[in-house]
Image: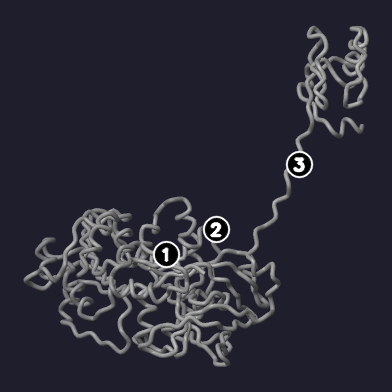
Amino acid sequence: MRVAARRWLVGAAARPPGWLGRAAAFAQEAGRPHLPACGRRGLCLPLGCADCGAAPGRSDEPLVRYRKAPEPAPRQQPVQPAALKMGTAGKVIKCKAAIAWEANKPVSVEEVEVAPPKAREVRVKIVATGICRTDDHVLKGSLPNINYPVIPGHEGAGIVESIGEGVTCVKPGDKVIPLCLPQCGECSSCLNPDTNCCLKTHLYESQNLMPDNTSRFTCKGQRIYHFLWISTFSEYTVMPDSAIAKIDDDAPLDKVCLFGCGFSTGYGAAINTAKVKPGSTCAVFGLGGVGLSVVMGCKSAGAARIIGIDINKNKFVKAKELGATECIDPQDLKKPVQEVLVEMTDHGVDYSFEVIGRVDTMTAALESCHMGSGTCVMVGTPPAGSRISFDPMLLFTGRTWKGSFIGGWKTKDSIPKLVSGYMEKKFNPDVLITHTLPFEKISEGFELLCSGKSIRSILLF
């Protein structure tokens, strides 16, 4: 039994009855009493000993093949972030964060204290975060209802460090994407299949503090405000469980962080909001990270003609690589760009997208649409307090003007599916990443953004 437990046998059908005894007898009849180095008398069969390599016996005996059982594979231990191994759950964590102390000032990298999550909250170790134009709006004070000092950042990916009481959607060690647009699952918007604008959004209900009206951030004894609840410009951050989505365990966090805002917003504006049809004509105003994602969405939907508009010609090559059929710089034109687009497309484009956030380009995008059937989608974030004045006849004839918020995705449901699609190579937002920087160089990342030298800069902690 001891030997049987150590070996497994192959070719049982070829074994005659009493094969073990016959093999031993055969060895004795051949004048070869068998006591090999392994010390197991009578167990070295005609093919030789599997333990010591002793020579085989006569080849005319029915062959009996056997070998050692394979060693069991070592048990794989789940990979855990360093924070979990250090036992930080339930404790205050000190880490790096970028703070905007006041509007119109650059961010400052500071050491902050991050309190543990309370009930229905999650603390996340951010691994990678992108720099979005909306973050620049925070620095410039042009985003509404922001309190300072604040930790910006809303396009990140990381690993759950700890969870508060009542959290069931994630667990420590999960890879996640924080959601700048929550999905509470309870409000009238979440229960309506036709909208993704959860009423917990900052545009309806302030997200400068956690739901209990307190902050989890302090620096130098001072309370620091959250941004959109998620503040991904902090190495550790806390958010409600309605503002987080678990993603594929194999997803590369330095790439899929783009699904937190940029790629999802642009791609979804074309796919979900405009519902671009095959063979249609599209115009995209603004060829930054979100605008190029719109281009990718239009191409995916089968648009026949995609016209990119930007005053930075350096973006034209990338735009054409991603699907733009032509690009124009309004500064080179002798008449307004919307008039040129109408002439180029025989009465206007089927779909236009404003991805800049300027009121003048918003009206230009609307005017560039076909007067009877065109759809204009507003994607860029307008400055706080801005107002639009336009001729209502532009809509009276049949144009549609609509907004797109984070691409129309119900975030908690859809972002994990988008990441899975990325893992299946259905689309490739990696091409939007032009710079990868250590977190300490965040100011350099903003300089690249404002100078037009980057599409997306990713900061790594």
Q: The residue under label 3 is which amino acid type?
A: Pro
Q: CA distance from mark 3 to mark 2?
A: 28 Å
> Which residue matches tag 3?
72
Relative horizontal placement of residue 77, taking residue 280 as reference (left or right): right
> Which residue matches tag 1?
436
Q: Position of residue 56 (x, y in %)?
A: 80, 15
Dot 3: what SS? loop
> Which residue matches tag 2?
248
Q: Residue at x 24, y 56 (%)?
A: 320
Dot 2: what SS? loop
Mark nearer the N terminus (3 vs 2): 3
Dot 2, crowdedness within 10 Å: few (<14), some or many (≥20)? Answer: some
Among the 4 quarters of the image, the one containing residue 39:
top right
Mark nearer the N terminus (3 vs 1): 3
124 or 99: nearer the eye? 99
Q: Position of residue 235 (x, y in %)?
A: 54, 74
Mark 3 and 2 residues: CB-CB less than 8 Å, in contact? no
Q: CA distance from mark 2 to mark 1?
A: 22 Å
- Which of the two discs, 3 and 1, sits closer to the camera? 1
Q: Residue at x 33, y 59 (%)?
A: 297
- Which of the two discs, 2 and 1, sits closer to the camera? 1
Among the 4 quarters of the image, the one containing residue 269:
bottom left
Q: Position of residue 59 (x, y in %)?
A: 78, 9
Q: Position of residue 224 (x, y in %)?
A: 52, 88
Relative horizontal placement of residue 270, taking residue 363 as reference (left or right): right
Q: The residue under label 2 is which amino acid type?
A: Asp
Mark 2 and 1 residues: CB-CB less than 8 Å, in contact? no
Dot 3, crowdedness within 10 Å: few (<14), some or many (≥20)? Answer: few
Compared to residue 459, the image places residue 231 above or below, namely below
Q: CA distance from mark 3 to mark 1?
A: 42 Å
